[in-house]
Amino acid sequence: MKFIIERSTLLKTLSHMQSIVEKRNTIPVLSNVRIEALADSISFKATDMDTEITEIVDAKIVETGATTAPAHMLYDIVRKLSDGSEVEIAFPDDKGQLTIASGKSKFSLSCIGVEDFPVISGDKLPVEFVMSKEELKDVIDRTKFAVSTEETRYYLNGIYVHAKNEGETKVLRVVATDGHRLACVESPLPKGAESMAGVIIPRKTVAEVRKLFDDVSVEEVNVSLSENKIRFSMEDVSLTSKLIDGTYPDYERVIPTDNDKELELNVKELSAAVDRVSVVAERTRAIKVLTSKNKVVITTSSPDLGSAMEEVEAKYDNGNLEIGYNFRYLLDILNEVKGDSVRISFTDGSSPSVIHDTSDASAIYVLMPMRV
């Protein structure tokens, strides 16, 4: 195997590969990226046994062949080569190693044979549909912050995606929750997704796909899935992942429908006020929101650090109330509000609050109160 490739092209591809590969592996070949020189292009593949990424890139092929090489080390070498340079990669050399040469630089890396490299992407995925990349980016961005990181409730460690009937309209609904907050976003249901069952896409897969969206110029993404796998294909890159095998909880049950008190605020003013108060609340993360006619007062106090208070104008006329929030959770939600104002509804200071973007009915957020 021998080929010549532009450093920028190789670096971009290896950044995708090394992002999938775990830094610590008990199985040595999983630390490697599979490299195969085809007739007129190079195929790169990396996996952690749960997620697999494949990318095809153009290169000048001198000799076909395949091997695997350490992903992170190869990425670091290419990253430190000169901008605009060409890289020659060959295998094997006289010592049976992979050589990387560029300008006056030359490196040799130990390899593992391709016969030991696992493949998880061979299964047929019967459900297929096409979705706008911007639409996918949007639903991911507005939900991924609420994904749980607690391994005990593994079924919450991803976003839940399913087809849903909203009256006569069918929508694709994406949900994430960690038990303290919930994000629920809807998008028009793509043609072909009508038969899809509810699936839980792992947190790592969501993060990797979202990064790929920023690196590809396509406008549409092909999505295919089965009961236990999902694949995202775009340009010459495809990412295949196992789904989380579990039952997602009945999230609709925790979305209040009888919150009778409504508070409307300018989202930028509220975010800025909460952000300033958070300087004092950094340790406890707790803030108090006190409502009164046409305003809210946001406060926090710490025996060690002191106290802070902010007043924000609001549309409100439902009596005085005090609610405690985790300021980080509140800011995460406010960061996803696209319009100028946000509406918060509640019944009392101990019940979940529902948060809406007043300019966008496709998203709803639930935030549990915090005892302050």
Image (spheres, rainbow, N blue to C red):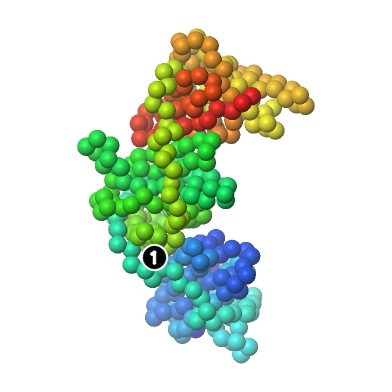
On screen, residue 219 versus residue 50, left or right, reads left
Say which residue appears at 39% left-offset and 78% top-offset.
40
Relative vertical location of residue 93 with respect to residue 48 in this rendering, above or below:
below
* Circle 1 residues within 10 Å: few <14, some 14–19, many ≥20: few
The C terminus lies in quadrant: top right
Residue 314 visible in this rendered orientation of the protein: yes
The quarter holding residue 78 reads bottom right
The quarter holding residue 111 reads bottom right
Say which residue appears at 53% left-offset and 62% top-offset.
20
The residue under label 1 is 236
Pinpoint residue 291: horizontal percent, then vertical percent. 53, 15
Residue sticking out furthest to the bottom: 94
On screen, residue 257 versus residue 83, left or right, reads left
Badge 1 marks a residue whose secondary structure is loop
Relative vertical location of residue 360 with respect to residue 176 in this rendering, above or below:
above
Say which residue appears at 62% left-offset and 68% top-offset.
25
Pinpoint residue 222: horizontal percent, then vertical percent. 33, 58
Q: Nearer the viewer, residue 222 or 213?
A: 222
Pinpoint residue 315: horizontal percent, then vertical percent. 45, 14
Say which residue appears at 57% left-offset and 17% top-offset.
322
Residue sticking out furthest to the left: 168
Relative vertical location of residue 91 with respect to residue 306 in this rendering, above or below:
below
Q: How many marks?
A: 1
Pinpoint residue 205: horizontal percent, then vertical percent. 48, 55
Residue 287 visible in this rendered orientation of the protein: no
On screen, residue 239 versus residue 77, left or right, reads left
Amino acid carrying label 1: it is Asp
Residue sticking out furthest to the right: 304
